[in-house]
Amino acid sequence: MSFNTRRHASSRTLQTPGRLGPNPADSRKTGPEPDARRGDGRCSSGQQGALRGRPGPRLRPRQPLGPWAETHAFPRGGADLIPGRESPVVDLNVGGEFYTTTLGTLRKFPGSKLAEMFSSPAKACLDAEGRFFIDRCGTYFGPILEYLRSGQLPTQHIPEVYLEAQYYEIKPLIKYLEDTPQIFGEQVARKQFLLQVPGYSENLELMVRLARAEAVAARCSRVLVCLVRNEKEDANCADALRSLEANKRSVVKFGPWKAALDISDLLDCLNMDIKAQGYQVCYSHNSPLPAKVSDYFYTFSFSWW
């Protein structure tokens, strides 16, 4: 075959219908060399993309989740405690009582202790089921939660709810409860009166200690109490107190005080506060002392069984 014939045959081969551009076999032969960093002799992903006529994949760096999402997962639905999130649902375990509410409800009063509990994952305590746990009485948390939800004011168990409101530092609820008759009478009337009686709390504890000391192998204990309202009555009881001390008879003395209340008021306060500690107690006006001073002495009886 002549030179011209071979030239025309080669030209016909390049113009074969259905085949455009260079021969694919030539591309495979002239492609990039395998990546020397790979031990198996294969091309890297970027080189494989170049073989197909497109750039290789780009790997995006992992974005940090931030301290909230990385350190704590919200127990319900897997939602994270991320600032700005729209009030995720929260499951609570308050002393064994279970409640469901939103984070926004718990944070309704930003300055409260309750809001502070849910302001940082480091302060959260979870139970075995992943619920937020608060080690308080759950029975009286319900009225507090209703107040946070809708502003509904409690009408029952006012003293107990008042104590819980003080613990959670919910100031608007505390102010309302202090205006109720139950709390107003306790805080303003009775406690203010007792503040006028010197050493009331210390003497109350002394009464309980004396009663417990005499409880060995006894069904009841008796504690003698002396109540004097003013300096004159105090002077009248001085000789009787010295006589009891000489006979080694223990006496708990209250007064004198400045408040304008009678002895019966102080007796009722003592009886109320001792019973509030769980003791069964009653008092009587029977004293072995002379009649002129007997009006100042009372016996408190503690029953043990």
Image: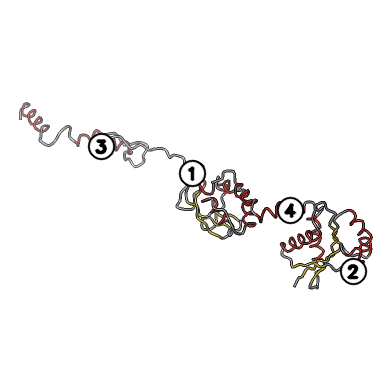
In the rendered image, the vertical position of residue 145 relative to residue 289, given as above or below: above
Q: Position of residue 258 (x, y in %)?
A: 82, 51
**Mark sitting on residue 191:** 4
**Amino acid, disc 2:** Pro
Q: Quadrant of residue 43?
A: top left
Q: Position of residue 233 (x, y in %)?
A: 89, 57
Q: Marks 3 and 4, how far apart in space?
A: 89 Å
Nearer the observer, disc 1 or disc 2? Answer: 2
Q: Which of the two labelled residues, at mark 3 and mark 2, occupies the earlier sequence position?
A: 3
**Amino acid, disc 1:** Ile
Q: Which of the two labelled residues, at mark 3 and mark 4, occupies the earlier sequence position?
A: 3
Q: Which of the two labelled residues, at mark 2 and mark 4, occupies the earlier sequence position?
A: 4
Please state, as top left, top right, bottom left or bottom right, where the N terminus lies in the image. top left
* Disc 3: which residue: 52
Q: Marks 1 and 2, how far apart in space?
A: 73 Å
Q: Secondary structure at mark 2?
A: loop
Q: Which of the two labelled residues, at mark 1 and mark 2, occupies the earlier sequence position?
A: 1
Q: Quadrant of residue 40?
A: top left
Q: Secondary structure at mark 4?
A: helix
Nearer the observer, disc 3 or disc 2? Answer: 2
227 horizontally vs 20: left or right: right
